[in-house]
Image (cartoon, grey):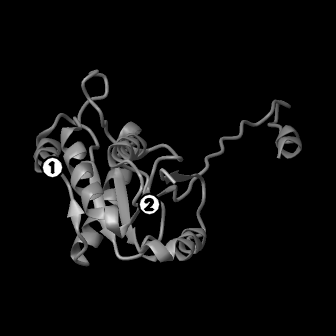
Amino acid sequence: LQRTVAGRLDAAGRPIPLFAETGGQSAMSVDSSALVEQVVGDAVSSAFDSAGQRCSALRVLCVQEEAADRVVEMLQGAMGELRVGNPGALRVDVGPVIDAEAQAGITQHIETFKAKGHRVFQDPNHVSAVSVSAPGTFVPPTLIELNHIGELQREVFGPVLHLVRYARNDLDRLLDQINATGYGLTQGLHTRI
């Protein structure tokens, strides 16, 4: 790549800059031995810092069935504590997404899953704050529960976290499903085993 780029010159003989971006369906697997408070802290930080617009931001949280209800409950509580707004203010946790096109695409993604009957959580205070907030392309932090990872067809570059529940004996199959998405960037694991 470096040799190829070095050979790209403009009409004046100067190197042409290369802007490269990675993308992926960053996932975290959580088993029933994991410390839920630690899982939720890490998930919220990874999924919602930078309004979820880092390539390595957590996109899919895979939680063993035995721990899933507790993780969801604590995750929703933690999401409710986030502050959405102008990131120039130190008290703000989640700023706007990059532009109106991104906002529309993310909002459409969320609405599509709502229409399909999936559980979608957005703190009501965020929804009302975003609708009347100062100018900006805000998307409320969102949690979408999936039936299986195959439902996620593309990377969603914003403050949206997808959650998949899995059975203890299905961990290998879950990892195969993650690999089959065609995306890959980071993989996290929470366990005390």
In the image, residue 150 sits, relative to residue 41, either above or below, namely below
Front one among 155 and 161: 161
For label 2, the crowd category at 10 Å Cα-Cα, with few meaning under 14, some 14 to 19 and many 20 or more, is many
Residue located at (22% from left, 35% from top): 83
Residue 96 shown left or right of residue 98 in the figure: left
Q: Nearer the viewer, residue 30 or 176?
A: 30
In the rendered structure, which amino acid carries the disc numbered 1?
Val
Precedes in sequence: disc 2 or disc 1 = 2
Q: Which mark is residue 127?
A: 1
Side of 16 where 143 appears, left or right: left
Residue 117 image point, x, y percent:
22, 77
Give the secondary structure at mark 1.
Answer: helix
Say which of marks 2 and 1 sits in front: 2
| Corner quadrant of residue 72 | bottom left
Can residue 173 be seen in this snapshot? yes
Residue at the spot of label 2: 31
Q: Quadrant of residue 48?
A: top left
Percent across and percent down for residue 171 are 52, 71
Residue occupying the point 44% across, 56% down: 59
Let me know if residue 109 appears in the view: no
Amino acid of disc 2: Asp
How packed mark 1 is, by other alpha carbons closer than 10 Å (few <14, some 14-19, many 20 or more), is some
Horizontal and vertical percent for residue 88?
31, 22
Question: Residue drawn 76% across and 37% down?
Answer: 16
Q: CA distance from mark 2 to mark 1?
A: 31 Å
Kindly identify the residue that appears in the image at 29 percent across and 43 percent down. 137
